[in-house]
Image (tube, rainbow, N blue to C red):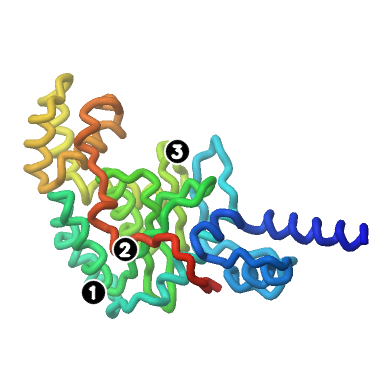
Amino acid sequence: RQEKKEKEISRRSRLYGLAPMAEMIKRGWINDAESLDQLEAEVCDFYGISSPEETPKPTANFRHAQQRGPEVNAQIVWIKRVEYLAKAQDAGRFDRARLRKALPDILACAAQAEDVARVPSILLSLGVRFIIVPHLPKTYIDGAALSFDGRPIIALSLRYDRIDTFWFTLMHELAHIVMGHREAHLDNFDDSDTETDAAEVEANQVAYNWLIEPEALKSFVKETRPFFSRSKIERFAQSQGRHPGIALGRLQYEKIVEYKHLRSLLVKVSPFLGDWIDVPTPQRVHAG
């Protein structure tokens, strides 16, 4: 009996080391099975593996802040959930040139907070699946550019539910796709100023330039420094066709404006994306 008990403890320990079980059960991604055999089957089914002894493989390059290491298995779980949801989305034909040509239409949604609601449908019409899976603890994921059945996926976590973060993350992932970066990318922007990967550096710069014209920003900063009032930021943002929170976020990232300044401009986007956010469900979900 003792040997059997120790074996069961070892199996359970292995299982809980393989995945964030409590969070997966809470979100309804797996059932809270009573027997260990059932629980192992649930996890294997989710991962798409044949045995809990098998180690799930990541399908994306992980970019994360250097000061803290994410839990890779939790990141893989997040990706698996994204891939499962992507299967249910009916996206149009994907053509990279057509996506590039449609960028002005996508960016036109960046003027008003409520217009983010139009973004998912535009992307789907262009063959780009759009998924929001809320942030899993200790994954530190902001967004990802993945692929399924030959068509791209943009996945967001809304870890920071703010209009500036939403638009930068979206455009960064779009940059990966438009620039033809081959690998899948899983992004965390907490430590992006130390980024050395060429694809990430390029995606950062392209996203910055798409959102705010570089020379216009340079002129605005030169003319306005050191007093960046709300009205001045709003006028500049309007001239760029952008929500003022996007302009403020860029100024704060560049350390031109303090992070505590004008926080009310950094409005949430989740109220406009409710139909696209993966919410907990008590029903059985297969993601493998």
Identify the residue under disc 2.
Answer: 276
For label 1, the residue is 125
Q: Secondary structure at mark 3?
A: loop
Q: Position of residue 124 (x, y in %)?
A: 27, 72
Which residue is pictured at 15% across the width and 25% down the height?
Answer: 228
Question: What separation in Å lies between label 2 and label 3 (alpha carbons)?
Answer: 27 Å
Helix, strand or loop for disc 1: helix
Residue mark closest to the camera, 1 vs 2: 2
Residue 134 vs residue 275: left or right? Answer: right
| Dot 1 or dot 2, earlier in sequence | 1
Camera-side residue of 71 and 204: 71
Q: Report whether 259 appears left or right of 63.
A: left
Which badge, 2 or 3, comes first in the chain's sequence? 3
Please rate how many residues cluster around mark 3, counting C-alpha atoms within 10 Å: few if below 14, some from 14 to 19, many from 20.
few
Q: Are marks 3 and 1 in contact (CB under 8 Å)?
A: no
The residue sitting at 58% across, 67% down in the picture is: 31
Name above or below for residue 37 compared with residue 197: below
Amino acid, disc 2: Trp
Instruction: Give the amino acid at mark 1.
Output: Ser
Dot 1 crowding, Cα within 10 Å, few <14, some 14–19, many 20+: some
The residue positioned 55% from the left and 73% from the top of the image is 288
Q: Which mark is residue 68?
A: none
Q: Give left or right: position of 137 versus 229.
A: right
Q: Which residue is mark 3?
A: 191
Q: Position of residue 215 (x, y in %)?
A: 15, 39
* Image position, residue 201 (x, y; %): 39, 47
Secondary structure under tag 2 reads helix
